[in-house]
Amino acid sequence: MNLWLRLILFLIALPFRPKLALPDCVSARSYRVLPSDLDINMHMTNSRYPAFADIAQLDLFIRTGMLRAAIARGWRPMLLASKIRFRRELKAFRKFRVETRIRWWSETNGIFEHRFITRGRDGSDIVAAVMLAKGCFYAPKDKRFVPFAEMVAALGLPAIDPPEPTPEILAFMQAEEELRLAT
């Protein structure tokens, strides 16, 4: 239930947040671990990380104009794959933020990075978890995946070349392809 409340609060605050510009923008959303987020180990349960990432990605889509452009054309955002690496636990009432960015894209897929960051005892940032997600926009009427260049054009931006994929992105894409072939 608390995720619904957090989603409502997100929507209320949205008009007051600045727009973001592709490709180097970062969406940052702050939260606190609530008792309803805990599992039997008394830290944030694994299922909450993708839920917070969904809200963060929605924030990125809305504030860049991508969601508006997609809805106007009948496109739908889709998650195709994800991988999470847990590094530090988030205990009850711990503050954290989710930083979301587009790290790389192919013709039709984007790789989104969600970093769950908290503060250490010395006040420095600590990465609690990192999630990579492969997503795209799908045009159901045409039964096709929307090219990233088409989304960029729909936003009225000039063509943007993707950055070079980093080793972790290449590894994620390779693992995703192996799993796709196995199923």
Image: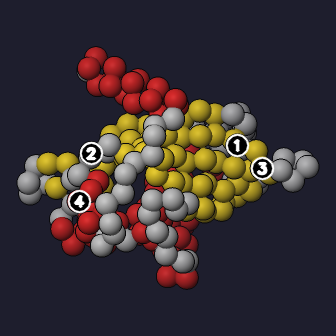
Which labelled disc corresponds to residue 127?
A: 1
Disc 3 versus disc 2: distance between alpha carbons? 34 Å
Of tags 3 and 4, which is closer to the observer? 4
- For marks 3 and 2, the one nearer the N-term is 2
Residue highlighted by disc 4: 150
Q: Is residue 163 left or right of residue 46?
A: left
Above or below 91: residue 157:
below
Of tags 2 and 1, which is closer to the observer? 2
Which sits in the foreground, 168 or 161?
A: 161
Q: Secondary structure at mark 2?
A: loop
Q: Position of residue 72 (x, y in %)?
A: 21, 72
Q: Residue furthest left?
A: 142
Q: Secondary structure at mark 1?
A: strand
- For marks 2 and 1, the one nearer the N-term is 2
Is the C-beta separation of discs 3 and 1 under 8 Å? yes
- For marks 4 and 1, the one nearer the N-term is 1
- For marks 3 and 4, the one nearer the N-term is 3
* Residue 43 position by quadrant: top right
Residue highlighted by disc 2: 107
Which sits in the foreground, 78 or 146?
A: 146
Amino acid type indicated by mark 3 = Asp
Of tags 3 and 2, which is closer to the observer? 2
